[in-house]
C-alpha cells in the first residue's frame, strides 16, 4: 500500500474517531470535547494538505493511484460465475482537491461552532454529528466504486438528517429534516437503479473497471439504455444537490444551526452531486448531457428569482446556493467540466464565508434572522462586514474574485454549447446570464438591508417577538458588537480564499492558473456513431460504438481527434464534439467576460437604487418576477410534488393499513377462530369415559370397512 493511500485512510477515519469520542464520552471531556473534535479535524486538514501537495506537485492532469481489496467473495455462483465485491481508495487530482475542501471547511465550521454554539443543549453531541458527517463526505470523495459511494451517500443523508433536526423540539426543524430525508430518497432510488444498470452490464461497481469495459466496447445494450443509466445516476445529483424539481428541501433545511448550513448546505453535501457528475462524466451520452444542462440552467435562474423577495438572511443564501449549484450542473451539461468543478471549489469557500458571516450577524443580534429588522451593522461589526463583502463580491461575479473566474468559464461554456448545438439550445446561456444579473441584485439587497442604513430592530412588531422561536430579541442597538476571534478567524480565512490569486495569476481568467492546468475536461461520453456507408449501400448504415481514450481507466483530457456525427454530435471527419465545445467556449470567452462584468455591475447598481436610494419602481419588475416564480414554486414543486407526494403516501399508507387490518389480520383471526371451533367440537368427545372411546373406535372401524368394501 502506497504511503499516500495510507494517509487517505487515516484522513477518512479521523472524523469517525471524533464522532465515537463525542457520542460516548463528550459528557466526561473538558468543554464537552469541542476542542478535541476541532483538533482531530484540524489534523485531518493538515494531512489533506500534505496529500494534495504531493499529488499537485506531480503536475500531471492524469495522476492516479488506486488501491482495493476484496470485500466479499461469494465464489462461483451458478448462473453468474465468479462473484465478488471490491472496496478501495481512488486518489487523483479531483480527490486531492476535494480532501482539502471538505476537511478545510469542516475545520473552520468546527472552530466557528465553539463560539456560535456555546451554551447550547446537546453541545457535545453536535460536534459528534459534525464528525460523522465529515467522515461520510470524505468517504464519497475517496472511494473507488459505485457501491461504496452509494453507502456513503446514504450515510451523508443520515448525518444531514441529524444536523438539520438538531433543534428537534421545534416542529419546523423536524418537518425540515423529514422533508430533506424523503426528497433525497427519491433521487437516491434513481441513483441506485442507474448503478444496477451498469452492474448488470459489467458485473463490477469499480469506476476504472467500468470505464475500461466501456472503452473495450462491452456495452451490449442500445444508446438509449446508456442515456437512461446516465439520467438515473443524475437523479442522485438532483436530490443531493437540490436541483429542480427536488430543490425544495434545501431552503427549509436552514432550520439547522447556521454553521451546519455553511458545512453541508454550501460547501460539501450539496456539492456531492456535482462531484458525482464529475466521476461519471465520461460515460454520459449527449442526450443525458442535454437533460443535465437544461435542469441546471432552469435551477440557476428559477432559484435566483425566488431569492429576490426572501427576508430571512439564511433563506436568501439558501436560494443562492440552489442557483449556484444550478450553474455547476449546467456547466457539466454543456461540457465545461473543468469550469464546473472549479466553481464547486470556489463556491465552497465564498458561500461558506457568507453563511458563517450570516451566523456572526445572527449571533450578534441574539438570533434575529429577519433582514427587515437589521441594518447599520457595518460600523458595529467591521470584520464581519468586510469579510461578508468580499465573499458577496465573489458570489456576484466581480473581477478580482474567484467567483468571477469560475462563473465566467461556465458562462463561456454555455455560449459555446449554444453555438455548437444551435437551435433552441440558446435558452441555456440565456438562463445562465439571467441568473448572473439577478445574483448581484438579490445579494446587493441583502448587503444594503443588513449592513447599511439605520438599525430597524425597534420596528419589529410585538406579535413577531412572541411568535419567534428564538430568544433575546429586542436588545438595544448599542449592545451589538463584533463576534469573538473564534468566529471571525474563519471568516478572514474564507474571504482570503475568495481572491483570484489563490487559483490564478490572471484576475480575468483562470486558464493559466494551477487549478485549470491540472483539472482538464475529458471526452464526455461513449459515442454511438452512425457510420457513413458507401453510396451504393447507404441503406445499410450501421451503428458503431466508439469510446474515449482513458489512462488506466481514469478520464483523460480530450485529444480533439475523435469523431461524432450530426449537429448535436461532432462531424465524423474532424474535431470531436468535446473539442468543438471547448473551441467555441474559448472563442466566446471575451463575450462572456464582458457580459458577466456588465451584468454584475448593473445588478449591484439596481440594488443600490432600490434598497439604498429608495427608488422602488426600479425593482418592481424583479419583485413581480420573484413573486410569480414563488407562486409557481408553491404550486408545483411544493404543492404537487411535495404535498401531493405526501398525500399520496399517506393515502397509500392508509390503504395498506386497511388491507393489513382486514385481510392479513383477518386471515390470522380466521385461523384462530377455526382452531377455537375445532377445539370446542373436539372437547365434546373428550369425556373421560371408556364407553365413549370404544363407541368412537367402533364407529371409525365401521366407517373404514364401509369405504374399503365399496372400493
Image (cartoon, helix red, strand yellow):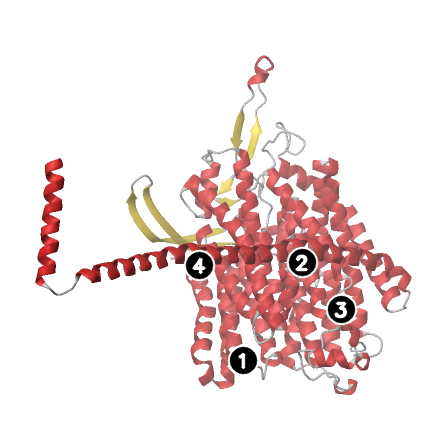
| Foreground of the two, 649 or 289 | 649
Who comes first in sequence, dot 4 or dot 2?
2
Are the two marked residues, 1 and 2, in contact with CB atoms closer than 8 angstroms? Answer: no
Mark identifier at residue 311: 3
Are the two marked residues, 4 and 2, in contact with CB atoms closer than 8 angstroms? Answer: no
Are the two marked residues, 3 and 1, in contact with CB atoms closer than 8 angstroms? Answer: no
| Foreground of the two, 26 or 418 | 26
Who comes first in sequence, dot 3 or dot 4?
3
Dot 4 corresponds to which residue?
661
Are the two marked residues, 4 and 1, in contact with CB atoms closer than 8 angstroms? Answer: no
Cα distance in 3D space between marks 1 and 2:
29 Å
Cα distance in 3D space between marks 3 and 4:
48 Å
Dot 1 corresponds to which residue?
123
Who comes first in sequence, dot 3 or dot 1?
1
Image quadrant where one finds the N terminus: bottom left
Q: Position of residue 44 (x, y in %)?
A: 50, 69
Does residue 83 lie above or below 393 as drawn? above
Residue in the picture at 32% in, 39% down: 79
Does residue 683 lie above or below 115 as drawn? above
Who comes first in sequence, dot 1 or dot 2?
1
Viewer can see residue 544: yes
Q: Secondary structure at mark 4?
A: helix
Bin the neighbour count of mark 1 within 10 Å (Cα to Cα): few under 14, some 14-19, many 20 and up: many
Cα distance in 3D space between marks 3 and 1:
29 Å
Cα distance in 3D space between marks 2 and 3:
17 Å
Closer to the observer: label 4 or label 1? 4
Image quadrant where one finds the C terminus: top left
Closer to the observer: label 4 or label 2? 4
Dot 2 corresponds to which residue?
322
Q: Position of residue 634 (x, y in %)?
A: 71, 58
Does residue 489 lie above or below 265 as drawn? below
Amino acid at each position: 500500500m502506497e504511503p499516500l493511500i495510507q494517509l487517505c485512510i487515516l484522513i477518512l477515519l479521523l472524523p469517525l474517531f471524533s464522532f465515537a469520542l463525542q457520542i460516548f464520552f463528550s459528557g466526561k471531556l473538558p468543554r464537552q470535547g469541542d476542542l478535541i473534535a476541532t483538533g482531530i479535524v484540524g489534523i485531518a486538514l493538515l494531512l489533506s494538505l500534505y496529500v494534495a501537495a504531493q499529488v499537485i506537485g506531480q503536475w500531471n492532469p492524469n495522476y492516479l493511484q488506486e488501491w482495493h481489496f476484496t470485500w466479499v467473495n461469494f465464489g462461483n455462483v451458478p448462473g453468474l460465475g465468479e462473484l465478488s465485491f471490491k472496496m478501495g481508495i481512488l486518489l487523483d487530482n479531483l480527490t486531492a482537491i476535494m480532501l482539502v475542501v471538505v476537511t478545510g471547511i469542516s475545520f473552520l465550521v468546527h472552530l466557528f461552532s465553539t463560539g456560535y454554539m456555546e451554551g447550547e443543549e446537546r453541545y457535545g453531541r453536535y460536534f459528534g454529528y459534525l464528525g460523522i458527517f465529515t467522515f461520510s463526505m470524505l468517504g464519497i470523495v475517496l472511494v473507488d466504486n459505485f457501491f461504496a459511494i452509494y453507502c456513503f451517500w446514504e450515510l451523508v443523508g443520515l448525518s444531514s438528517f441529524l444536523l438539520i433536526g438538531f433543534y428537534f423540539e421545534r416542529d419546523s426543524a423536524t418537518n425540515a429534516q423529514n422533508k430533506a430525508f424523503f426528497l433525497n430518497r427519491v433521487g437516491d432510488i434513481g441513483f441506485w437503479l442507474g448503478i444496477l444498470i451498469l452492474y448488470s452490464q459489467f458485473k463490477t461497481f469499480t469506476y476504472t473497471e467500468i470505464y475500461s469495459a466501456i472503452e473495450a466496447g462491452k456495452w451490449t445494450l442500445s444508446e438509449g439504455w446508456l442515456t437512461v443509466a446516465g439520467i438515473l445516476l443524475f437523479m442522485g445529483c438532483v436530490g443531493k444537490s437540490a436541483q429542480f424539481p427536488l430543490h425544495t428541501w434545501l431552503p427549509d433545511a436552514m432550520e439547522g444551526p447556521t454553521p451546519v448550513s455553511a458545512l453541508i448546505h454550501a460547501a460539501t453535501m450539496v456539492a456531492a452531486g456535482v462531484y458525482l457528475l464529475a466521476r461519471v462524466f465520461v460515460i454520459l451520452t449527449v442526450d443525458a448531457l442535454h437533460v443535465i444542462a437544461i435542469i441546471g440552467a432552469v435551477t440557476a435562474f428559477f432559484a435566483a428569482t425566488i431569492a429576490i423577495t426572501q427576508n430571512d438572511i439564511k433563506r436568501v443564501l439558501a436560494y443562492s446556493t440552489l442557483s449556484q449549484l444550478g450553474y455547476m450542473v449546467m456547466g457539466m451539461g454543456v461540457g465545461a467540466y473543468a469550469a464546473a468543478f472549479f466553481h464547486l471549489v470556489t463556491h465552497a469557500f465564498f458561500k461558506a464565508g457568507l453563511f458563517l458571516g450570516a451566523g456572526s450577524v445572527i449571533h450578534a443580534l441574539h438570533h434575529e434572522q429577519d433582514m427587515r429588522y437589521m441594518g447599520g451593522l457595518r460600523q458595529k461589526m467591521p470584520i464581519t462586514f468586510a469579510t461578508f463583502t468580499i465573499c458577496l463580491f465573489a458570489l456576484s461575479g466581480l473581477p478580482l474574485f474567484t467567483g468571477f473566474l469560475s462563473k465566467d468559464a461556465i458562462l463561456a461554456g454555455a455560449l459555446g454549447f449554444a453555438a455548437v448545438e444551435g437551435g433552441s439550445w440558446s435558452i441555456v446561456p440565456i438562463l445562465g446570464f439571467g441568473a448572473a444579473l439577478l445574483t448581484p441584485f438579490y445579494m446587493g439587497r441583502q448587503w444594503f438591508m443588513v449592513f447599511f442604513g439605520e438599525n430597524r430592530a425597534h420596528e419589529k412588531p410585538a406579535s413577531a417577538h412572541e411568535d419567534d422561536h428564538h430568544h433575546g430579541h429586542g436588545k438595544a442597538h448599542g449592545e451589538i458588537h463584533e463576534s469573538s476571534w473564534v468566529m471571525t478567524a474563519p471568516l478572514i480565512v474564507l474571504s482570503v480564499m475568495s481572491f483570484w490569486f489563490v487559483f490564478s495569476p490572471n484576475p480575468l481568467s483562470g486558464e493559466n492558473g494551477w487549478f485549470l492546468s491540472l483539472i482538464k475536461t475529458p471526452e464526455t461520453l461513449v459515442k454511438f456513431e452512425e457510420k457513413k456507408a458507401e453510396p451504393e449501400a447507404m441503406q445499410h448504415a450501421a451503428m458503431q460504438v466508439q469510446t474515449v481514450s482513458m489512462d488506466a481507466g481514469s478520464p483523460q483530457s480530450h485529444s480533439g481527434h475523435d469523431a461524432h456525427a450530426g449537429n448535436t454530435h461532432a462531424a465524423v471527419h474532424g474535431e470531436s464534439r468535446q473539442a468543438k465545445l471547448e473551441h467555441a467556449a474559448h472563442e466566446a470567452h471575451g463575450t462572456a467576460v464582458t457580459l458577466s462584468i456588465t451584468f454584475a455591475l448593473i445588478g449591484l447598481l439596481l440594488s443600490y437604487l432600490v434598497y439604498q436610494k429608495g427608488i422602488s419602481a426600479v425593482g418592481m419588475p424583479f419583485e413581480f418576477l420573484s413573486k410569480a416564480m414563488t407562486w409557481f414554486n408553491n404550486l408545483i414543486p411544493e404543492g404537487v410534488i411535495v404535498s401531493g407526494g405526501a398525500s399520496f403516501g399517506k393515502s397509500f399508507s392508509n390503504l395498506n393499513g386497511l388491507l393489513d387490518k382486514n385481510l392479513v389480520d383477518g386471515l390470522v383471526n380466521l385461523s384462530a377462530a377455526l382452531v377455537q371451533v375445532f377445539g370446542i367440537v373436539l372437547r365434546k368427545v373428550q369425556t373421560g369415559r371408556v364407553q365413549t372411546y370404544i363407541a368412537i373406535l367402533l364407529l371409525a372401524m365401521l366407517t373404514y370397512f364401509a369405504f374399503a368394501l365399496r372400493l
